[in-house]
Image: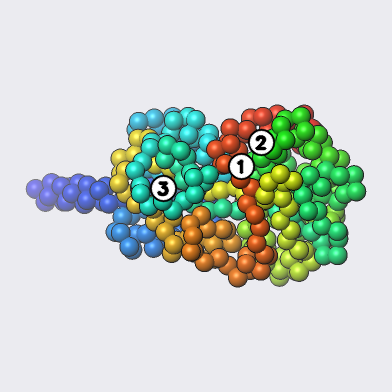
Amino acid sequence: MLKKIALSAVVLASSLLASGEVNVYSSRHYDTDKELYKMFEKKTGIHVNVIQAKADALIKRMESEGDKSPADVLITVDAARIFKAQEKSLFQSINSKYLVENIPAKLRDKDNRWFAVTKRARIVAVKKGVQAPVYYEDLAKPEYKGQIMVRSSSNVYNQSLMAAVIAHKGVEKATAWAKGIVANMARNPKGSDRDQARAVAAGLGSMAIMNTYYMGKLANGSASDKDVVTKLKVIFPKFKNGGTHVNVSAAGVAKYSKNKENAIKFIEFLASKDAQSIFAKGNYEYPVVKGAEISPLVKSWGTFTEDDISINKLGENNAAAVKALDVAGWR
Ligand SMILES: [Fe+2]
C-alpha cells in the first residue's frame, strides 16, 4: 500500500515537472548560457534541461527521434546550421509579437521558424604596426602573401563568410578570392580561431581571420592569452559593396515540441534586453535587439556597418561555399 502511494506521488511529481519544463538542444558552449538558464528558471519556474552537442549531432538526433523527440528548442551557433535544421523541417512556425517586433527581419526566418539571439562579426585581428586591410577583397591581394592565419574550410564560420562572398560576387569571383587567400596563408589551416590569433602574436603571419568574441575570450583568458591581445588590433573589414560579415546564434521551436508555450517563452527570454546584455557582456557577442548593453571591451573596438546579406542567404549558399572552398584548395 505504502509503495503504491509513494509511486503515485512520484507520478504526480513528474507530471507537474513535465508541465513546467523546456528541453533545449544547444550547440552553444559558453558559461553565459548556464547563467541565463538559471535566470529563466528563477523568473518563470520553468525548468531548463539542456543537451549540449555539436549542431550536426543534434540535428541528426532530432531527425532520428522524429515525433518522439523531447526537444523543444534547438540553438545553433551558425547561420548554415540553423538553415540546415529548417530545411530538414525540424522547426515549426511560432507566433511571437515580441520576437517579430524586436529582431530585425534579416536576422530571423520569414515564417518565424527561427530567430537569431546573438551576433558576432568575422573580423581580422592585425598585428599592431602592420598595414591593415580595409576590405575582405584586400585579403586576397598578393601584398599579403604569407601573412594570413585562418582555420580550415571545414569550419562553418569560414563557410558562412564564403557564402557571403558568393552572395556579393558570384561563385566564380568568390572562388578566385578564396584562391588568393590560400596563396596568402602563412601555414596550412589548423587550430581554432583563437589559435590563429596566438600564432600571429607569436610571429607567424601578421593577421588572423576570426570571430569577435574570441578576442574577448583571449583578453579575459590566461596571462599568455592576455598578452596575445596586447599585440593585436581588431579591424572590421567590409565588402566593397557591403558591410562587415556577421554570423549569428539562432534558436527555433522544435516541430514536435511538447512544451511549445514554454519554448516560446524561453526564446523570448533569450531575446529580452536583460538576457541580451548578459550574452553581450559575458560572451562578448553583439545583441540582436536595440537597447541592450555591450561589453566595454567590445565597445572599445569601435563600430562597424553590418553586411546586409540575410542569414537565410548564408544558409542557402552553404553548399556552394563548401564546394568553392574545395575548388580553391582551402583545406
Ligand atoms: Fe565559436
131 relative to 158 in the view: left or right: right
Q: Where, by quadrant of the figure, is residue 180 drawn?
A: top right
| Residue that mark 3 sits on | 100
Residues packed near mark 2 inside 10 Å, few (<14), some (14 to 19) or many (20 plus): some
Percent position of residue 188, x then y: 81, 43
Could you tell me if the residues under marks 2 and 3 are in contact, i.e. CB atoms within 8 Å? no
Q: Which residue is mark 2?
A: 167
Upstream in sequence: badge 1 or badge 2 = 2
Say which residue appears at 86% left-offset and 44% top-offset.
141
Q: What residue type is disc 3 on?
A: Val
The colour scheme applied to this rendered structure is rainbow
Residue 160 screen position, x and y as percent: 64, 41
Sequence-wise, the earlier of marks 2 and 3 is: 3
Asked if the residue at tag 2 contacts the one at tag 1, i.e. Cβ–Cβ closer than 8 Å, the answer is yes
Residue indicated by mark 1: 309
In three-dimensional space, the C-alpha distance between marks 1 and 3, rounded to whole angstroms, equals 19 Å
Please say if 145 is above or below 321.
below
Would residue 70 be found to the left or right of residue 104 on screen?
Answer: left
**Percent position (x, y) of residue 289?**
48, 57
